Image (cartoon, helix red, strand yellow):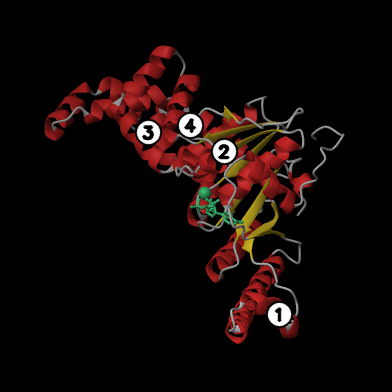
Amino acid sequence: MNLTELMTRRVVVCCGAGGVGKTTMSAAIGCAAAHQGIRVAVVTIDPARRLAAALGLSDLGDTPRQVDLGEMTGPGALWALQLDAKATFDRLIHRHAPDRAAAERILANRIYQHLSRAVAGSQEYMAVERLNELTEDPRFDLIVLDTPPAQNALDFLDAPQRMADFIEGKALRMLLSPSAAHGHLGWRMLHAGSSTVFSILERVTGAQLLRDLGDFLSAFDGMYAGFATRAAAVRTLLHSERSAFVVVACPDDAPVREAVALIDRLRTDQFPVAGAIMNRVHSTPSAHLDLGALRTAVMPISLGAPDDLIARINDQWIEDQVRADRDHDACVRLAHALGGHEILTVQELDDAPVDVHGLIGLANVLGAATDPPDGTHR
Ligand SMILES: Nc1ncnc2c1ncn2[C@@H]1O[C@H](COP(=O)(O)OP(=O)(O)OP(=O)(O)O)[C@@H](O)[C@H]1O
Ligand SMILES: [Mg+2]
């Protein structure tokens, strides 16, 4: 995987198991891209504030916030944002409702309020809408998407399809488009013409619920096709070569297994897997420990007990060697899952990056060219 090539895409999706470094790598890729002259937005679906922390910011919201790149000058720019599913849903209503009054009616509706709160709990649906909005925003060349841990990442991938299935669902269409229901009791008919049925049901249920549902459905009438269209557009984009999926792992057994499963799943579903990053790799200690040289070196500081100190250093050396070998095997397993493609590795750092500067350093380790290319993006 080549980081510079990655930056020519429209969307880069970082996915992987929990805690492996997806957010850190998304932020690093974003910084590296900005450094290369690209206007990039890093968006996190993860409600935890890790992206803000990695960028050295106190907070992030749903509106893209431009990140100060310090002494880094040039055409590149970096924005960061954190998905707010409810805000995205509300904005969607404002944008796509036929008029302001209709939008206000939906937003005030109790069914909508319940639904939008439920949607806020399952971020994937609105992530699809948000991604669609961002790809239409002319400010950004590239969108880097930081996903929640693997299980949810798969949900995210399924979301466009699930949304399209739901919207194209026959039962829903029958309910929403009475004209398509051919002789069945369509929703509008029920709503407009059956106030008696309603009032009886309302008395039975003792609630305003049905009327709210009626208002909600009729207010939404006409907006459903838009959901399906946008979900399909995102699905097409994510399946195309304009997107790249980067699987992040760290060299422990479970994350590597999850990464391998994720690569298989992405490939089966024909998502473009660009490669993988193995994060937190321990480097190999010097190949040979010269005990004679070590004895000479430690003698002046060993306070008369050199053998003990040498034994401890030797044990540590063996431990580091075992860990480095284990990490190397994990890299081989991951590379094998990718069909032998090279994977990028990032060392275990003493201090994880907490600002743009640190992230650029990390991106340089990932293989980004330090000098901005003279050509333009794309
Ligand atoms: N190479 C590294 N060396 C040392 N610490 C690291 C490294 N990469 C990431 N970390 C630290 O590991 C922790 C987890 O990283 P991060 O939040 O990026 O993972 P994540 O995959 O996004 O987690 P989650 O699945 O919870 O969203 C953070 O505290 C981060 O600073
Ligand atoms: Mg994260």
Q: Earlier in the sequence, mark 4 or mark 3?
A: 4
Q: Residue at x 76, y 33 (%)?
A: 37
Of tags 3 and 2, which is closer to the observer? 2
Q: Earlier in the sequence, mark 3 or mark 1?
A: 3
Please name the residue that numbered disc 1 is placed on: 294
Spatial CA span between label 3 and label 2: 20 Å
Vertical order, 330 against 158 (above or below): below
Q: Residue at x 74, y 74 (%)?
A: 286
Q: Are marks 3 and 1 in contact (CB under 8 Å)?
A: no
Label for residue 61? 4
Label 4: few (<14), some or many (≥20) within 10 Å? some
Of tags 2 and 1, which is closer to the observer? 1
- On the picture, is 223 further left or further right than 352? left
Label 4 sits on a secondary structure element that is loop
Can you give x and y, in whole percent of width and height, for residue 49 in the image? Answer: 47, 42
Label for residue 43? 2
Can you give x and y, in whole percent of width and height, for residue 303 in the image? Answer: 59, 79
Label 1 sits on a secondary structure element that is helix
Identify which amino acid the numbered label 4 is placed on: Gly
Spatial CA span between label 4 and label 3: 18 Å
Q: Earlier in the sequence, mark 4 or mark 1?
A: 4
- On the picture, is 39 further left or further right than 176? right
Identify which amino acid the numbered label 3 is placed on: Ser
Of tags 4 and 1, which is closer to the observer? 1
Q: Is mark 3 within 8 Å of ligand 1?
A: no
Vertical order, 14 against 119 (above or below): below
